[in-house]
Amino acid sequence: MSIPLLSLIVFVPVAGAAVLVFMRSDDAVRWTALGFGIVDLALCIVMLAGFDTTTHEMQFVESRPWVAALGIAYALGVDGISALFLFLTALLGLISVLASWVAIDRKVKEFMVSLLVMQALMLGVFCALDLFLFYVFWEAMLIPMYLIIGVWGGEGRVYAAFKFFLYTLAGSILFLIGVIVLYFQGGETFDILALTAQDLPFGVQSWLFFAFLVAFAVKVPMVPVHTWLPDAHVQAPTAGSIILAGVLLKMGAYGFLRFSLPMLPEASLYYSTLMLLLSALAIVYGGLLALAQDDLKKLVAYSSISHMGFVTLGIFALNLRGLEGSILQMFNHGITTGALFLFVGLIYERTHTRSIANYGGLMKAAPIYTAFLALFTLSSMALPGTNAFVGELLVLSGGFAANLAAGTAAVVGALLSAAYLLGMYGKVALGPPSVSAKYKIHDVNGREMAAILPLAIFVLWVGLYPRPFLGIIDASVRNLLVQVHGEGIGQ
Amino acid sequence: MTAVALLQWVLASVPEIIVVTGACILLIVGELVRKGRDELLLWASVAIVLLAAVATLMLAGEIRPAYAGMFISDSFAVFFKLVFYLATVLTFFLSRKYAEIEGIGRSEYYVLLLFALLGMMIMASAIDLLSIYVGLELMVLCTYVLTGFLRKERRSNEAALKYVILGAVSTAIFLYGVSLIYGLTGTTQLDRMAEAVSGGPLDPALLLAVVFIVAGLVFKIGAVPFHMWVPDVYEGAPTTITAFMSVAPKAAGFAVILRVFLNPLVEASNAWIIVAAIAMATMALGSFVALVQDNFKRLLAYSSIAHAGFAIFGVVAGGQDGIASVMLYLLIYAFMNLGIFGAVIMMRNGDFSGEVIDDYAGFAKFHPGLALLMLLYLFSLAGIPPTAGFFAKFYVLVALVERGFVALAVIAALLSVIAAYFYIRIVMVIYMREPERTFDPALTPLVRATLAFTAVGTIGIGLFPAWFLRLAQQAAFGG
């Protein structure tokens, strides 16, 4: 009997939340939450250290019957597609705790409990090998996220929380019906691996593809079901935005990779053009919307829609470069956009305004802050040497191979991102000082630096030496391509 | 008719005999209990129910038909009786303090609840339309009186009157259906009815009879189009009685519906189309109208209509999984609904009624623990995992899809999204509003115990549904 590493990873945050419930002082709560976050991250690193990159098989597998009468099992495992996301989730969870250190000043205990529960559920989503278990994790996330946005959010938090909740619930409830249909079509099992091995008739695949699409498209979010995202992001506290952008959005794309592609290969191929065009639409439309924003958070939120368009573009290019690029890009987007939301949060704590027009000349007042902001801005627009360059390049080359029009649109989107991001940076950091004259802005402190540095390291590490990251995902992506295209074709 | 056979019959109905004897004794002795010693009544009533529960469990092993085809003690009946016991005992616990505040804690209150329990037990065991009728009437007569128990409150009187009149009409309709059945088949026994019609072409008059019976039964579970009484009665009745009525008599109604509808006769008459229409209309109406309610009890009334609609989807699915899904749904609903009612009842203290949703604004600030429990019940009612409410809905959907009703499953699922809105709206009021007043919930040890017990059930069945699922499946398959 080996150590159930994945169960530990998933349930350490739950244990942390349970401990927090009995604590009284706010400081003790913060430090304890941080401690459990560090333990969880360490466990993820142990998992990655023991991860075998040569196989596409599930690793660290655990399986126990849960509801035997319905063929439901408690089954966990990771492969190349999910491994990086476990790490990303634990890392961003930790950074969220740091980001809320002083930003959250009321109901600290409740907040940290919600955050840790949220982290556990997200980790569970990425390593569930049973569809029912996956759905439980997936849907249960609504509860803590609803509270995080609704209790600790900004002015319009209640509206944003409702919108987030109902959009996601409506999307995933159809997914649930799809799961049940799949259960009966696939021989009364919820085992994801067994269902992947099934060969379903095309008609069924088509229906299921669209049932799944609704759920995943809402989460990603793809245009036209993206409208919850700007509201949720703008109203959520910084930690909520980091979790939302960094991890939650990845789940939709992860759903495509884990379910739609391997279980419904014929439908995925058949509808891939549609998906490519929707992705291209998201890239351009999200970029144009971002160009018009004055609110910093909204700008980053719309840029997320555009960047997630790259991810779905890469997925439905259905070739090696596209898929590897999109998985890497999901990781990158988590790091970079998480960092950008962190930066917006940091400056908002100091000035209490998010309007770009109020800023200017921050470089004088906060040189370290603006230097790192420059790094992440450049990373977000995919400058060579940063992480997103590698991902976007792979996605673009895969995208062009699959569909010329979509590829072209993506290039336009990349140009747009340079326009809005540089514009934003120019107005905030350069030029004559405005807010910094009125408010006394202190530069980043040690705690904030502790949150920023790991993200900065990953920006450069992936940008300069992406091999270890691509190595983790390679075997699983190749196997996924075989599942979609059949033996021998997958390139 | 030998003495041994008679003894067998009596044995099969020992739980009912315990309850009826206990209730009669309590009716007489209860008058002798001095004022201020009301808790004696409570504990005596609880003891009677627990005794009946022990007897029921001891008889659970085998199927025992009794009273010449009128009555049966099988695992199906046992399951429902356990739900009734659970609901009744928890209602007693919740009643103690509430009855004191409202001044209704006399012996009749407990006796009437016990007789209502007896009626429900007979309904669960009845396999003849006439014994069904007897149980049904016994139950509803008691609930009529209990509804009007707040004698000085006009709302309560009005509710009782409305309930009696509408209830009498629905009973008459039911009886008319029974008489038609008897005229056409020559029997009122459920299984003989099926034999009488098998083979020949279906008489259109039979369909009419079935529709009448359906109408009479649907009234009891508060489904559309016979739901009009529910909001008024739920709002006007003492809150403890509302809690009781929303769980136990509803479950009893479903017990009869399952016995009657899954009879081959009804299956042959294509009544499932009517039932499917009822399920959709019920759920839609309950969900949409609940969106605009300000009164907590009224909202829970519409919520209970919506839940009845969802459970009827399980009846539509039919088959063993369909039956089991309805039964599991009712069990889980008993836990979460009594929990949320417990929270409403506890708010009633002093002059404060706690019936308006806005009364709960900022509740989480002063009572984080209680707020968390309410959060749990509300998300369970909304059907969000990992709570039990999710598993209940999930299993109904599984049963529907298994029988090929995918479109119905989609409709049921989408309607439950609408229903989710008004539950999370209450969560919003509790957590995201600033408090306007301080709270002084009437938290007696009994209320605490009830809340803890229902919370454990709500989260426990959600996390470990396997055992409860097997229980429901065995009850459905074996009976």
Image (cartoon, coloured by chain):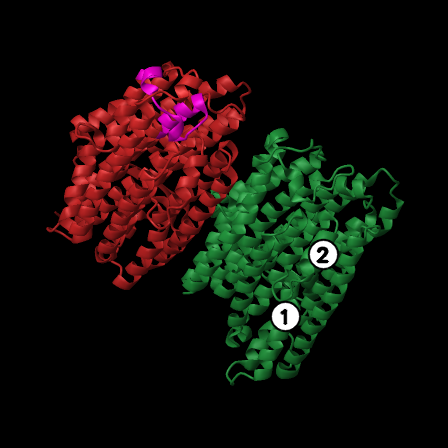
Residue at figure coordinates x 23%, y 36% from the top left: A328
Query: Circle 2 sits on which residue?
Result: B233
Residue B101 percent across, percent down from the top left:
79, 40
The dominant secondary structure in magenta is helix
Q: Which residues are magenta?
A: A341-367
Residue A391: name its quadrant: top left
User: Is A346 covered by the magenta stretch?
Assistant: yes
Q: Amino acid at mark 1?
A: Ala
Residue A54 percent across, percent down from the top left:
16, 35
Residue at figure coordinates x 21%, y 30% from the top left: A387
Task: Establish if A318 lies above or below A336.
Answer: below
The answer to whether residue A44 is seen in the rendering is no
- For mark 1, name the chain: B
Q: Secondary structure at mark 1?
A: helix
User: Is B476 covered by the magenta stretch?
Assistant: no
Residue at figure coordinates x 72%, y 47% from the top left: B240
Q: Amino acid at mark 2?
A: Val
Q: Earlier in the sequence, mark 2 or mark 1?
A: 1
Q: Which chain is red?
A: A
Task: Establish if B90 lies above or below B221.
Answer: above
